[in-house]
Amino acid sequence: MTQYSWGILGTGKISHKFAQGLREAAGARLSCVASRSTQKAKEFAKVYDIPKFYGSYEELAKDPSVDIVYIGTLHSLHCENTLLCLENKKPCFVKNHLPSPPMR
């Protein structure tokens, strides 16, 4: 089975849920996390046994060991962060948490 190395951008509530789920995913390994704060990234990494943490999103996007990135930042930053990763040849997973439209 192929093993994919994941990076997580952002250390908020949804990123915690994603990291918990990724632990159970076959073929997935959390390799690094990034936050705008090195301290927050370090704390997140400690909780999930993530070997690397960064105090900037750019550092994670440029990490050659990362195969795919989960974008867990604020919605208003999703486009900017996704483009950063794609410019660095990193596929991304971005979850839109907007409410569903009303049913007719």
Image: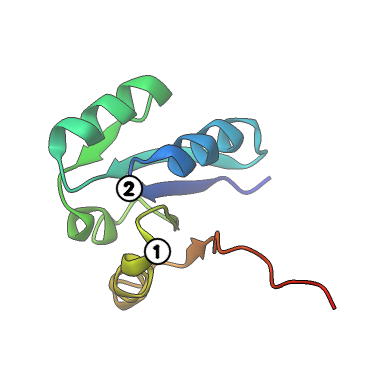
| Tag 1: amino acid | His
| Tag 2: amino acid | Gly
**Can you tell which mark lies on residue 10?**
2
- The residue sitting at 37% across, 41% down in the picture is 12
Residue position for label 1 = 75
Q: In which image quadrant can residue 102 be found?
A: bottom right
Q: How would you rate the neighbour count of disc 1 (Cα within 10 Å): few for under 14, some for 14-19, many for 20 or more? A: some
- Residue 32 position, x and y percent, is 33, 41
Give the left or right position of residue 40, taking residue 23 as reference.
left
SS for callout 2: loop
Viewer-side residue, 85 vs 63: 85
- The residue sitting at 37% across, 70% down in the picture is 82
- The residue sitting at 35% across, 55% down in the picture is 73
Q: Quadrant of the N terminus?
A: top right
Q: Are the residues tagged 1 and 2 within 8 Å (C-beta)?
A: no
Q: How would you rate the neighbour count of disc 2 (Cα within 10 Å): few for under 14, some for 14-19, many for 20 or more? A: many
**Can you tell which mark lies on residue 29?**
none
As displayed, is residue 99 above or below residue 66?
below
- Residue 71 position, x and y percent, is 41, 57
Q: In which image quadrant can residue 50 be found?
A: top left
Q: In which image quadrant can residue 57 be found?
A: bottom left
Q: Quadrant of the C terminus?
A: bottom right
As displayed, is residue 12 above or below residue 65?
above
Give the left or right position of residue 67, taking residue 57 as reference.
right
- The residue sitting at 28% across, 60% down in the picture is 61
Report the mark closest to the observer, 1 or 2: 1
Query: Which is nearer the N-term, disc 1 or disc 2?
Result: 2
